[in-house]
Image (cartoon, helix red, strand yellow):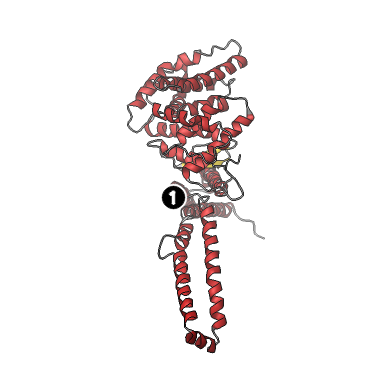
Amino acid sequence: MTRPEQQELLEMRLVALRQDLAKVQKVAGAAGRRSESLGRLQGLIGTYDSKSLFQRLSRAQGLFGMIMNSIRGDRELFDRIEEHGLAAEVEELETLLPDAFQALTMARKELDDNAHLLVKVDPDMTRSLVRRCRTESDLVKDLLEQLKDGTLGPAEVWERYEKLLDNGCKELFADYVDFLGGLTLRDNALDDEVCAITDSLLREIPGNPKLLALPARRPTLSSAFTELVKLGFPDWTIWNIPLVGAEIGKSYVERYGIGDRFAGLLGENAEDAPVLFADAYAAYTIGPAYGCATTLLKFQPDHEAEHYRAAVILGVLEQLAQTATGFGDVVDRAKEYWQEALVRLNDNADPDLALGTVRPFVSAVCEELAEDDMVESFKPVRWDQVTEIRDELGSETVIGYRPPTGLSALVLLNAAWATWLDNPGDEDWAKRVTDNVKTIWRAVSDRHVPRGGRYGQA
């Protein structure tokens, strides 16, 4: 057997890489069309369209009933049908039509019960991935052509191939796997409503380019999917949903940048300005729920870098709290728990030091965001809605409860955190609030109970 030369082996690698990229591109395109066939099936079976199978079969059943009544009322006609040996077939048809209609009714119900589980992926959603695949594939194609025509030597092509693989394709493939895995989890209702609530929250933030949330291995701002937010495990809970605010804030920073004016207000922490600005943006738009999710569940009190992140978030919330009754109580409690942990884990810690250091930065960012028409702060009126449903979230059950019209995910998440803080160390209490949030959300979004599940299932 002849051993392949280095160039032949390299050509095989490049060809294989192009095939991998083509596979990702093909599946990405199919993902954008995945709900179209289901939509057509629903239209075919649907109950309202006069051309639907359901309506046509219903009409046929009615017409056949009228015909049978006429036959039974006309003895001569009935005898003639018997003479032709069709009486048994007519009677069988009379039984088959209702059976077929019943079977279609059950199929329609099954379809309706499960259609909502299939995540609707707009074709625009996958365009960034397809575009990225084409770009990488073109680069591989160029390398292959330059290798074959001798423009580049094998050694240089190997180097470029490895760099292309490490810097672009591996990340792209990881995003692709996360995308498919996340869709599967959501399609089978294994994300426990977390992604659906997150999707709604993303839509409620004006000017936000993120459209879809999916469970993933790690929380990242995907480089291959412009519109995707990946919720890293184990943050697939309602309590961590507000953490997507950081991703939205990062998007804002990437679009508009952070001027020297903001970095200069942070002194030795100037290099952290983009991250701190993103935190400020998240707190400003999402409200206390973001502050609670970060300081009470996410940040580590013994990590100094997170002291300043927490300080920025709490500083923004304190400014917003000046105009909302009751808002400040939740912020104060989160601040109290966080600062108590700081003192316990850090000798000689001054819990107010970071807050004092970032105050000029916080004021400047809030002023900047207030002047941006595309940014909407967490307004006092929202806190009035939070107060309205807090008692319900802490009740034994909310089955049958009719939530306020237009209840938003933003309000529901803030109400959940405010309610949990009534009994922060009570596990049963936290579970009750969790279950009630999901039940209310299903009522608000008119969601069906997942097959095999029940309302309020943890």
- Helix, strand or loop under label 1: loop
Q: Amino acid at mark 1?
A: Asp
Where residue 222 appears, as percent x and y from the top left, is 49, 40
Q: Is residue 210 visible?
A: yes
Q: Which of 273 and 368 lies nearest the eye of the viewer?
A: 368
Q: Is residue 71 above or below residue 22?
A: below
Q: Residue at x 41, y 49 (%)?
A: 124
Q: Is residue 67 above or below residue 243?
A: below
Q: Residue at x 46, y 79 (%)?
A: 70
Where residue 236 appears, as percent x and y from the top left, is 57, 38
Where residue 79 appears, as percent x and y from the top left, is 52, 87
Q: Residue at x 49, y 20 (%)?
A: 329
Q: Residue at x 51, y 43 (%)?
A: 442
Q: Where does label 1 land, which residue?
A: 122
The reply, left or right, for residue 209 in relation to residue 190 is left
Where residue 122 appears, as percent x and y from the top left, is 44, 50
